[in-house]
Image (cartoon, rainbow, N blue to C red):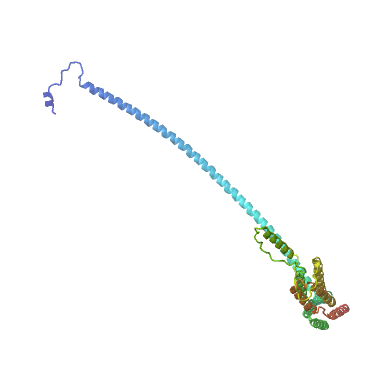
Amino acid sequence: MTDQDAKEQPPAADTRPGEPNVAERPAKASGRGLAWLALLLVIVLGLSGAWLAREGYDRQQVLTKRLSTLDSTVGREQSDLQQMEARARDEWRSALEKLASTTRAETDALTRRIEAREAAVSQLQDELGRFSASDRNSWLLSETDHLLRLANQRLVMARDPAASLALLQGADHVLQEIDDPTLHAVRAAIAADMAALRAVAKIDVEGLYLRLSALIEQAGQLVIFDMPRQPDRAKPAPAEEWRGRLRQGYEAALARLSEYLVIRRRDVPVQALMDPQWEGLVRQNLRMLLEQAQVALLSGNQALYAASLERAQHWVGQFLQSDEAAATALSAELTRMAGQTVVQTLPEVSRSLRAMEAAMNQRAQSQGGQ
């Protein structure tokens, strides 16, 4: 719009001189309100900024305190860890030093013990080295003399030629180890005694003893008196009439009486059976005689052995009527055992012992002369 156009337009309204224009009032009022509003916003923004700055400062202070606290805590923990490491290092060092000292002490004690043992072994070796071959032979000769004495005692006291022969063989082995020509006479006497023992008749004493034990057990099972038993009969049904009941009672009484009275017919006369009250006495006598035969067997008493079995035959005969099969078998076994020889003619084996004593006396005299 140009100045000319502005001039040509009529005035908007009549205005009084000295008064402001009516259109300018609202514009001024609105401008004044905006200014206040802007001032208020500036104040609010300022206060908000101040409050936020204060809040940030406070948070920064809190964080700073926390950081300082964490730093102090970390420092304390690091110092504690360092102290613990130092303490553990000291404890390990002291434990290792103690273990090392204990190990050194045990090693020293073990070394001293080994040295003492070595010294003892060395002393024993020196003592053994001082013994000569003659001393060893003297020990072996003493052992041979002991074996020969045991062989004589075993033969005389126990009547055991097998054990005596084994002892003589042991003595001969010892003399063979010595290998001394001066002991030839002793070995010759031992060989003669062993030949005499080998010629002794073999008697199975153990087998005979066990057979007698079996007979003792069998004798305890023999039967002297046995009451015969009648088979059980079925009871008839009761009769209806009195005559029938009377007949059944008579038959029952007769059957009960027949259980006590037994009638047997034989073609040959029968001896009277032994009273049952003597059964224990007969068994005891038979057992005593068989045990007496065992004692005679062990002692080599032929007369007592035969007499005991002969008397046992008499008591076995008491069972022939009551227990014929078992008594016959027992009697036959007693007859077979009565023919056994229980006596051994034992030789004298003292020649080797006398030869050994002579050799030892001669050796002692020769050593004393030297």
In this view, the residue in front, 50 or 348, is 348
125 horizontally vs 53: left or right: right
Q: In the picture, residue 161 is in which quadrant?
A: bottom right
Q: In the picture, residue 326 is in which quadrant?
A: bottom right
56 horizontally vs 87: left or right: left
Q: Is residue 47 above or below residue 88?
A: above
In this view, the residue in front, 158 or 190, is 158
Q: In the picture, residue 359 is in which quadrant?
A: bottom right
Which quadrant would the C terminus be assigned to in this image?
A: bottom right
Residue at the image position 46 percent from the left and 36 percent from the top: 62
Which quadrant would the N terminus be assigned to in this image?
A: top left
Residue 247 visible somewhere in the drawing: yes
271 horizontally vs 252: left or right: right
In this view, the residue in front, 294 or 177, is 294
Image coordinates for residue 280, horizontal then vertical, percent: 80, 66
Tell which residue pokes out farthest to the top in this image: 17
Residue at the image position 82 percent from the left and 69 percent from the top: 285
Q: Is residue 5 above or below residue 358?
A: above
Q: Is residue 38 above or below residue 353?
A: above
Image coordinates for residue 308, horizontal then vertical, percent: 83, 74
